[in-house]
């Protein structure tokens, strides 16, 4: 399965066709039932390293490469006995892996990317592998927004943990309560930090569009990632697409004080719970204060004094 054309008028259509082809190409590999030889290009990214560890814990052979090898992810990979080659080289792909997972920082011209394409080695994005192996058979909770995703995802995972729900999770950092940024558990829930950044050089959709959200948290929304988005409207478009993935029996929990969030919510087909300080919010926050040891507030649920 090769790259997709990039002519503007055909981009979205060709991308859908490409992703459909890729999906069927990967099914036999991903669900063969046998341990796979996996190679992660750009393995020291936070999500990529975490996913590599999860896959190794499931019994697969895992190795990878990166140019920027430093803590904390380098130490986590070392602790999990995952070999990391310094730099990107075509020779790193020998012996030939069953599947290459390509990080979103890599692009055409990278030696390993070019080797994968020329040798027709099956490849996949980090986000799609996460969906196929850890999200699709569970109830998916996704935390999105421009700011506060890592903190909110960590808090949500901890709440579920304290409730005895044994959640799996993927967080864009190391959560101190867990000592890890990822976990694969037997519980029915999987909690994911949903990033709006693009998926890979061959899939320019936002990462969070892979995560099958049943429940979605939308913290806030403002202009960011100027390297891939030209305007706030471009970012809002990605979030509108995310909202369209939430089923009608799911739920969106969103910041009712954020004008951009409120614009995006106009395109929702799912029940919405608003939080914030505004009177129209379903969960109204008052008496908000910062004190030593934490943040304190009173939450008043509408029609429930």
Image (cartoon, rainbow, N blue to C red):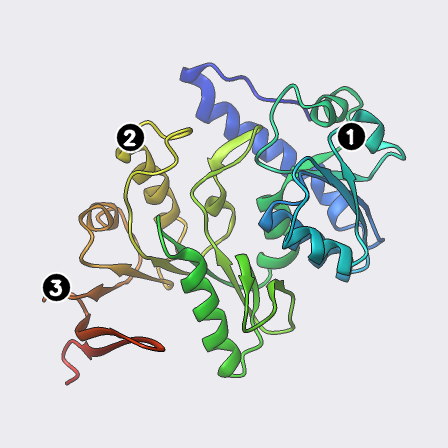
216 lies left or right of 114: left
- Which SS class for mark 1? loop
Q: Which residue is drawn at 61% across and 69% down?
A: 179
Task: Determine which of the numbered discs, if any, sits on residue 67 in the image.
Answer: none
In this rendered view, identify the residue nearer to me: 181 or 234.
181
Q: Disc 2 designates what residue?
A: 231
Residue 278 numbered mark, or none: 3
Res 214 seen here:
no
Q: Nearer the viewer, mark 2 or mark 1?
A: 2
Tell me the distance, in whole angstroms, between the alpha carbons under discs 2 and 3.
27 Å
Question: In the figure, 235 relative to 36: above or below?
Answer: above
Residue at the left extreme, as displayed: 279
- Crowdedness of circle 3 by 10 Å Cα count: few (<14), some, many (20+)? some
**x and y percentages locating residue 24 in the rendered image:** 67, 38
Against 162, residue 126 (above or below) is: above
Q: Position of residue 146 (x, y in %)?
A: 35, 48
Question: How many numbered tags mark residues here?
Answer: 3
Q: Where is mark 1, residue-wise?
A: 121
**Is residue 230 left or right of 195 when viewed as pictured?**
left
Q: Which of marks 2 and 1 is nearer the N terminus?
A: 1
At x 15%, y 66%, the residue is 277
Q: Where is residue 221 in the image (x, y as percent from the top left)?
A: 29, 47
| Res. 117 in view | yes
**Alpha carbon separation for disc pair 2 and 1:** 36 Å
Q: Do the residues labelled 2 and 1 touch (CB within 8 Å)?
A: no
Q: Is residue 186 left or right of residue 84?
A: left
Name the spot of residue 71 as percent of width and height, x first. 64, 52
Tell me if label 2 and label 3 are in contact, CB under 8 Å: no
User: Which mark is first along the chain, 3 or 2?
Assistant: 2
> Reading the chain from its start, which is encountered first: label 3 or label 1?
1
Residue found at x 74% / y 47%: 30
State the CA–CA distance, disc 3 to disc 1.
Answer: 53 Å
């Amino acid at each position: 399965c090769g790259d997709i054309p990039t002519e503007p008028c055909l981009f979205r259509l060709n991308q859908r066709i490409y992703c459909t082809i890729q999906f069927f190409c990967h099914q036999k590999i991903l669900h063969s039932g046998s341990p796979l030889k996996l190679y992660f290009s750009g393995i020291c990214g936070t999500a990529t390293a975490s996913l590599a560890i999860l896959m190794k814990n499931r019994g697969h052979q895992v190795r990878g490469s990166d140019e920027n090898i430093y803590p904390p992810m380098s130490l986590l990979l070392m602790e999990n006995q995952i070999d990391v080659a310094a730099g990107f080289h075509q020779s790193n792909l020998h012996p030939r892996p069953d599947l290459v997972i390509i990080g979103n920082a890599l692009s055409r011209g990278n030696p390993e990317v070019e080797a994968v394409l020329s040798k027709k080695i099956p490849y996949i994005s980090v986000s799609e592998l996460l969906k196929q192996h850890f999200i699709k058979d569970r109830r998916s909770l996704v935390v999105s927004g421009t700011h506060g995703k890592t903190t909110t995802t960590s808090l949500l995972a901890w709440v579920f943990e304290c409730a005895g729900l044994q959640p799996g999770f993927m967080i864009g950092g190391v959560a101190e309560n867990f000592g890890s940024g990822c976990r694969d558990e037997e519980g029915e829930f999987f909690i994911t930090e949903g990033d709006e950044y693009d998926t890979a050089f061959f899939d320019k959709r936002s990462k969070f569009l892979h995560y099958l959200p049943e429940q979605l948290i939308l913290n806030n929304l403002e202009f960011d990632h100027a390297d891939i988005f030209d305007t706030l409207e471009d970012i809002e478009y990605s979030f509108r697409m995310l909202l369209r993935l939430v089923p009608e029996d799911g739920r969106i929990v969103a910041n009712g004080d954020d004008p951009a969030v409120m614009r995006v919510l106009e395109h929702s087909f799912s029940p919405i719970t608003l939080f914030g300080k505004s009177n129209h919010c379903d969960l109204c926050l008052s008496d908000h204060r910062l004190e030593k040891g934490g943040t304190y507030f009173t939450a008043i649920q509408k029609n429930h004094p």
